[in-house]
Image (cartoon, coloured by chain):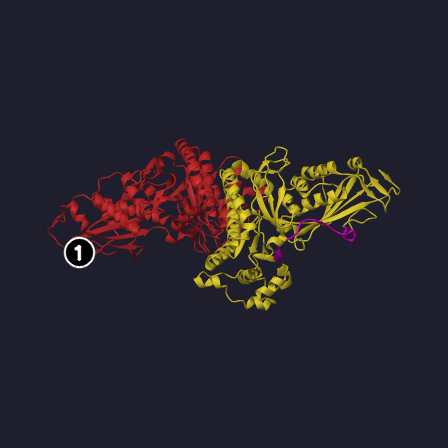
Chain colours: A red, B yellow
Amino acid sequence: MASEAEGWILTATGRAPTNIAVIKYWGKRDEGLILPVNDSISVTLDPDHLSATTTVAVSPTFDRDRMWLNGQEISVSGDRFQNCLREIRKLARDVEDVDKGVLIRKEDWQKLHVHIASYNNFPTAAGLASSAAGFACLVFTLAKLMNVDQDHGKLSSIARQGSGSACRSLYGGFVKWAMGDDASGSDSIAVPLAPESHWNDLVIIIAVVSAKQKETSSTSGMRDSVETSPLLQYRAQTVVPHRVQKMEEAIRSRDFASFAMLTCSDSNQFHAVCLDTSPPIFYMNDTSHRIISLVERWNKAEGIPQVAYTFDAGPNAVLISQNRNTAGLLLRQLLFCFPPPPDSELSSYVIGDKSILGEAGVQSMNDIKALPPPFLNKDGSPCQKIAGEISYFICTNLGSGPKLLDQNQSLISPSSGLPK
Amino acid sequence: MASEAEGWILTATGRAPTNIAVIKYWGKRDEGLILPVNDSISVTLDPDHLSATTTVAVSPTFDRDRMWLNGQEISVSGDRFQNCLREIRKLARDVEDVDKGVLIRKEDWQKLHVHIASYNNFPTAAGLASSAAGFACLVFTLAKLMNVDQDHGKLSSIARQGSGSACRSLYGGFVKWAMGDDASGSDSIAVPLAPESHWNDLVIIIAVVSAKQKETSSTSGMRDSVETSPLLQYRAQTVVPHRVQKMEEAIRSRDFASFAMLTCSDSNQFHAVCLDTSPPIFYMNDTSHRIISLVERWNKAEGIPQVAYTFDAGPNAVLISQNRNTAGLLLRQLLFCFPPPPDSELSSYVIGDKSILGEAGVQSMNDIKALPPPFLNKDGSPCQKIAGEISYFICTNLGSGPKLLDQNQSLISPSSGLPK
């Protein structure tokens, strides 16, 4: 290590998207390395609406590794964080900043400490895979800072050790996490199936369901399922491989009907395995069930799927529409069945890509009150209007993978080395 | 047929219990004959609290078969009813009533019509297997009227053709429905495992959950599961045979821990298969989930299961306690977490075997208000008090099989041949 100014600080800032699995990851074959029992497939969500931004800083003045999440300092002693940091440090290379007169040799990285500041542009509490975006962003940004010369596949295998599904956030569009078979986990990596431009008609509406009770963490839930569900291994070994193949075909050919049927079935089967766990795990609640019923009835009435639904380890619905027109029709139905509380504002009830409100023909709270009952009600099954069950809707699209941001977007002060 | 008085009417009146499966029946391999994809095991419930009473009458003056259920005439044209009637008629034998001067030869039964009146001593709408008790009672009582000389196994194979689970109501105590393998269904019959006296400590509390929406019928739900759930056949072929064997052992040795674990797991797996169906079927709701959580937390806190839960094709919980003491403690917890609405009466909120209220130390609405939080709350997980989610609780016990009632309990007038 050589430097003209002893108090130097180097930083890198990156942004990484979150993702939602359409073929689900549930169950590890190796807890430490986070190796899954089956392949999974996800779509990456638009980072403008759902992403993590992370700045990593290095300085000889830092006396230990530290991290701040959404402004609060958090512990870095966890295995998952330490594994990511260790693996990235192994790949670190020489870094020279001529302007600052700094040269870090690759062997120096073992002795240097980092400060990390990260924030999510969406509520962490909403249960929207914040750890996936967070660990992907951490690994991506550390790799940039440390001049790591590896492809995103290798980085994904490191992010995987932070949070399994984080590996899929290293790419945009459609991504497969290949389970691999090597005991070291070296081949358990993310593989890009198609960029977001391949099928950019798709529109995503996330219904953030008002949570009433604490949920089982996915880490412990998954472990319980592996240990107690008689159905999990059958799903992993027999059902999923076939579905992964079908899903890859559906994505390749942009076959929405097949994509939607596989997505819905696999979400349901994941929750079936949770229910088959002892004690049983319930992530979906009555509101989740009502959203499923709404989508199923609409898809049935149309004769061909218009919308796919999928639920992760919580009650929130992720609804994938074939196109903007369908998304507008869906949003009308959702706003009719789950109107905002009377004293709320439309602008905080439908967030993200608000242009979908235009497709829905809804520009005000009065427009929502004036919505006609959705056509699906003509079959005699009434859709109750229930305010308060949904916190808000996020409208979004498919998105791109991680990217480096400008220095002026840094979350860490270049002088103090602490969060701004 | 010979008779002195042309207007004669002969009647028989029987009562049959309902039952609740602890290893579930879900899926038919033959829709017409109602042959299941796996064995199932049930406990018979006390007919004093949950049973069907049926009177069948025969007279040369009847011009067609007719039936009344709970006082309302209903159609008898359905296949299931017709199959039962046809099969029983085939087995009919000579009947002589010397007092009335009536002799019916077995070949006469093909020409004679019957009137049937049936009622359930529990709400049909509560989703408590009223069809099981109903068809068991119909077949049992017709067999008595027609002097059928067959064991209950044979009668169970006929009741099965009315409603699958009805076959298990031909016996008291613990009953297995052996799936059989003959294409005719002749060996798909109920087999008594143990009489109710074998393990009469068990106490059953049924929480009748206020239903908010119409449910999928079990007939169509089962068909959808067989056609679309990838997990159903694996369950039927691989998981259930092992569980049936374990359950028979648990019953034989009165091993409550094993009985409870198998009962809960199998209920959950049945609902998992429903969720794995396309479109998914949700029989349990948030109230059902809360009851499961209450039981699971209690069982965990005690270190050994105190209570088993099981849910059929609806949100109602059937809770099986090891003994009266445990049932009292359970009822206290249930009444704390699900108190009756303020303006209701205890006597209509806890029905059936009300002596369990004594075990619970609850004799008035004020006693419920004064209940301390259940001990399970000491771990910091609060149990919300939610009134209105439960319609009422039925306390009951194991019960006996069908029996013939006195003529004075007949539901049909001996002079008019119509319901009293």
Residue B66 as seen in the image, left or right of residue B307: right
Name the amino acid type tagged 1: Thr
Q: Is residue B3 visible?
A: yes
Query: Given the current orientation, which residue lies at the most extreme front position?
Result: B253
Tell me: B407 left or right of B22.
right
Q: Is B271 situated above or below B346?
A: above
Q: Is residue B334 magenta?
A: no
Q: Which residue in the rendered view is the most extreme toward the right?
A: B4
Measured from the top left, where is residue B231 in percent x and y?
49, 39
Magenta region: which residues?
B394-410
Is residue A405 shown to the viewer in this render? no
Q: Label 1, on which residue?
A: A61
Q: Nearer the viewer, residue A116 or B76?
A: B76
Residue A160 in the image: state x and y as whole percent. 32, 44
Residue appearing at x 33%, y 51% in the figure: A120
Q: How many marks?
A: 1
> Callout 1 environment at 10 Å: few (<14), some (14 to 19), or many (20+)?
some
Residue A385: x %, y % from top left: 53, 51
